[in-house]
Image (spheres, rainbow, N blue to C red):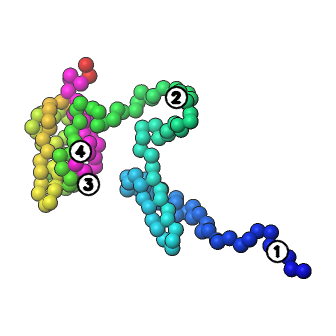
């Protein structure tokens, strides 16, 4: 008498490729992307990072306040987009901190900037655009690197005036 197999044969599902997932996660960190997806041999892998402030979300079934309160560290800088001294990129292009490669930057952290003074240059469509300081004050943060591509509205630097600390 022939025996029946206990479990009927199932379609073989591909094994999870942990190395591919790690490689994609590393690529996200290196490029600053928030999401990446690849499809190969009928298998799709999607890796995304949560860009919310805390990085976690409460499930709808959990009551508000279910998480213990954690004091925010005092050394964490505020969101640059919320700072009154934000200098944002007015265009898409490549930002340069100085007038030429290897030249001294227009401003450095701690420099005094005057309204209208050139802070950086953004190259867009082979045109060099000088970006002036929108206000006078002290440069407290430079949020980009020399030669870095920037997007419209991307934070470039923070200029604090005496009225910001009041």
Q: Position of residue 139 (x, y in %)?
A: 22, 35
* Mark-to-mark CA distance, 4 and 3: 12 Å
Q: Is residue 144 magenta?
A: yes
Residue contact between numbered discs 2 and 3, judged by CB atoms under 8 Å: no
Name the residue carrying label 3: 149
Residue range (magenta) = 139-164
Q: Nearer the viewer, mark 1 or mark 3?
A: 1
Q: Which mark is residue 132?
A: none
> Residue beneath label 1, please?
4
Q: Is residue 45 left or right of residue 110?
A: right
In front: label 2 or label 3? 2
| 140 in magenta | yes
Instruction: Check the image and report above or below for 31 versus 15.
Output: above
The quadrant in which residue 72 appears is top left
Residue for point 14% across, 38% down: 133
Q: Earlier in the sequence, mark 4 or mark 2?
A: 2
Q: What residue sits right under mark 2 in the picture? A: 64
Q: Which mark is residue 153?
A: 4
Element type at marker 3? strand
């Amino acid at each position: 008498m022939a025996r029946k197999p206990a479990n009927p044969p199932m379609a073989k599902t591909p094994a999870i490729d942990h190395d591919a997932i790690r490689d994609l996660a590393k690529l996200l960190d290196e490029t600053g992307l928030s999401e990446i997806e690849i499809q190969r041999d009928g298998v799709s892998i999607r890796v995304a990072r949560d860009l919310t402030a805390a990085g976690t979300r409460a499930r709808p079934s959990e009551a508000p306040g279910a998480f213990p309160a954690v004091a925010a560290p005092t050394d964490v800088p505020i969101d640059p987009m919320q700072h009154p001294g934000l200098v944002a990129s007015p265009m898409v292009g490549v930002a340069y901190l100085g007038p030429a490669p290897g030249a001294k930057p227009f401003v450095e952290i701690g420099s005094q900037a005057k309204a209208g003074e050139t802070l950086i240059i953004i190259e867009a469509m082979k045109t060099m655009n000088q970006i002036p300081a929108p206000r006078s004050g002290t440069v407290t943060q430079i949020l980009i690197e020399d030669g870095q591509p920037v997007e419209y509205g991307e934070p470039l630097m923070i200029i604090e005036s005496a009225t910001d600390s009041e």
